[in-house]
Every structure is written in structure tokens, then in C-alpha cells.
Amino acid sequence: MRTHTTTTKMIDPVCGMEVDPSTAAAEACHEGTKVFFCAEGCRDAFVANPERYTQPKRKGVWQRFLARMEKATGGKPMKCH
């Protein structure tokens, strides 16, 4: 009989790699939350400047334009005629 086990994968905030917390190469605590890393180099980069990796990424010009268009049209496609 096989047993199915589910492990929660976390995302390394520095490189974006999936990390299994039970086998993570490094970890750190940031604002009361454990953060797991694929390598010590990623942890060192995070510890040196955590705001760089915890703040949401800014949208580019195209994403801002599309968001504005969606807001203006209420999410409905624009009519061409």
C-alpha cells in the first residue's frame, strides 16, 4: 500500500525557486515569519536588503495600461464598431 504525503513548497523570495522547508539549505526570520531559501547566498542577499524582496514588484507600462483599460471598460472587451 502506498501512502501519499503532501509537503508544502515555499518560494525562495530571492530567486523564485520552489523550496521544501524540510530540506531547505537556509532559513531566516523576517517580521515573525520564517522564510526558506535554496542556498545560503540567497539568504545572505535577503538578510542584507529584505525590503527589496518583500515589496510587491512594480508594474511595467504595458501592465499599467491594461489595468487602466480594464478599469475603464469594467472588464468587458472594447467594441470596435
Image: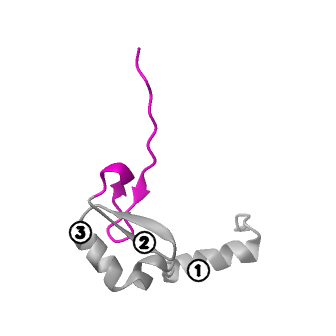
Residue for badge 1: 65
Image color mode: one colour
Q: CA distance from mark 1 to mark 2?
A: 37 Å
> As shown in the figure, which amino acid type bears the numbered disc 3?
Glu
Q: CA distance from mark 1 to mark 3?
A: 38 Å
Q: Nearer the viewer, mark 1 or mark 2?
A: 2
Q: Residue at 74%, 68% (x, y): give it.
A: 81
Say which label, 1 or 3, has the lower sequence index: 3
Q: Is residue 77 left or right of residue 17?
A: right
Q: Tell me whether the residue at label 1 lies in contact with that at label 3, contact meaning CB atoms closer than 8 angstroms.
A: no
User: Mark 1 or mark 2: which comes first in sequence?
Assistant: 2
Query: Callout 2: helix, strand or loop?
Result: strand
Of residues 18 and 57, the one drawn nearer to the viewer in this rendering: 18
Residue position for label 2: 29
Q: Is residue 29 above or below residue 58?
A: above
Q: Quadrant of residue 24?
A: bottom left
The residue beneath circle 3 is 40
Residue 4 lies in what quarter of the image? top left
Of residue 8 and residue 31, the one placed in the foreground of this image is 31
Front position among marks 1 and 3: 3
Label 2 crowd (10 A; few <14 / some 14-19 / many >=20): few
